[in-house]
Structures are given as structure tokens and as C-alpha cells.
Image (spheres, grey):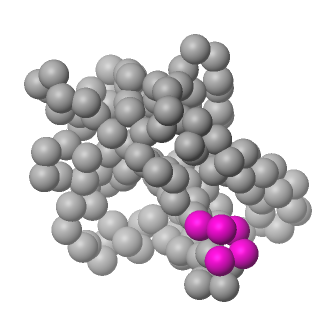
């Protein structure tokens, strides 16, 4: 689900917290060495996400935020911010000539350039976090 997060909205925050868990506490953030990626250049998105990108020839940037039960992909279009809510059990990560994230029939492809290389450690952390969460038995119970 894509949520407009330009302005603080209690309903949107509650939806995100319900599906992905509340943001990590400070000590966990320090232990994880950060919960957000640096921005990356978006190469392409699925047709149903095109409306959230700049239509002019501007570069589109996105970033990823870790949550206890999933990730948020933040996309900025002019002055608006949109967040794609992806629980770990729906998350699929592919890497070929592009780095892409898939869920619910949608995808975002990021370019594999200098910005991607700076985020390589974060992507590995995200993959480990996903595997750790999905391998716990209580994840599916609640």
C-alpha cells in the first residue's frame, strides 16, 4: 500500500505501525548502525507506481527504512513524499543489472551506481533482518 506521508497523519502512522511495527528504539537503532538507507536513483517502477514519480526528466530518488516487521520505501515527487509499506513476508529482492524490490505485483528498480555501492551494507542488513524475522515462529502468530 502506498501512503502519502508529506504531512503527519495519525491514521497513516497507525497503519504503518500496525503492519510493520513501531520504529526501532534508539538503542536498537545504534546496535543496527542505522535503520535508513542513503538515497538511491530510481531507474524504473511498475506501471501502477508511475504516478508517484516526477514526470519531467528529473532524477527520481528513493530510500529504504527498516521496521521490525517490514520496510518502507520512501519516494519523493516534487514537494510530496510517498511511502510504500512492505511487510517482510511479501518482500522479494532481486539483483541483476539493477537492484529491485518487488511486492504485491509492484516493483521499484534502483540503478547500480555509486549510490548503490554506498548502500550495499544496508541492503545486506535488510536481507539479514528479513531472514531473522521470518525465521522466528512468533512472527506469523501476531
Q: Residue at x 38, y 50 (%)?
A: 74
Q: Of 34 and 48, which appears nearest the observer?
A: 34
| Residue 31 lies within the magenta run | yes
Question: In which quadrant is the C terminus drawn?
Answer: bottom right
Looking at the rendering, which quadrant does residue 20 occupy?
bottom right
Q: Residue at x 33, y 39 (%)?
A: 61
Looking at the rendering, which quadrant does residue 28 occupy?
bottom right
Q: Residue at x 65, y 26 (%)?
A: 94
Where does residue 102 sit, x and y in percent of width and height?
A: 55, 31
In this view, the residue farthest toward the top is: 97
Extent of the magenta region: 30-34
Tell me: residue 116, above or below residue 132. above
Q: Of 121 and 107, which appears nearest the observer?
A: 121
Tell me: residue 40, above or below residue 65. above
- Residue 106 seen in the current view: no
Where does residue 22 sit, x and y in percent of width and height?
A: 54, 75
Q: Residue at x 17, y 52 (%)?
A: 80
Q: Of 100 and 58, which appears nearest the observer?
A: 58
In this view, the residue farthest toward the front is: 114
Magenta stretch: helix, strand or loop mostly = helix
Q: Of 139 and 70, which appears nearest the observer?
A: 70
Tell me: residue 17, above or below residue 64. below
Where does residue 36 sit, x and y in percent of width and height?
A: 52, 59
- Residue 129 seen in the current view: yes
Amino acid at each position: 500500500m502506498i501512503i502519502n506521508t508529506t504531512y503527519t497523519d495519525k491514521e497513516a502512522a497507525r497503519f504503518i505501525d500496525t503492519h510493520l511495527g513501531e520504529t526501532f528504539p534508539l538503542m536498537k537503532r545504534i546496535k543496527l548502525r542505522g535503520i535508513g538507507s542513503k538515497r538511491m536513483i530510481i531507474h524504473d517502477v511498475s506501471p501502477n507506481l508511475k504516478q508517484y514519480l516526477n514526470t519531467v526528466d528529473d532524477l527520481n530518488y528513493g530510500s529504504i527504512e527498516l521496521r521490525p516487521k517490514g520496510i518502507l520505501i520512501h519516494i519523493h515527487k516534487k514537494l510530496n513524499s510517498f511511502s510504500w509499506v512492505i511487510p517482510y513476508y511479501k518482500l522479494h529482492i532481486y539483483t541483476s543489472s539493477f537492484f529491485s524490490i518487488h511486492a504485491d505485483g509492484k516493483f521499484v528498480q534502483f540503478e547500480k551506481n555509486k549510490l548503490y555501492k554506498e548502500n550495499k551494507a544496508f541492503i545486506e542488513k535488510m536481507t539479514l533482518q528479513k531472514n531473522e524475522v521470518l525465521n522466528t515462529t512468533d512472527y506469523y502468530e501476531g
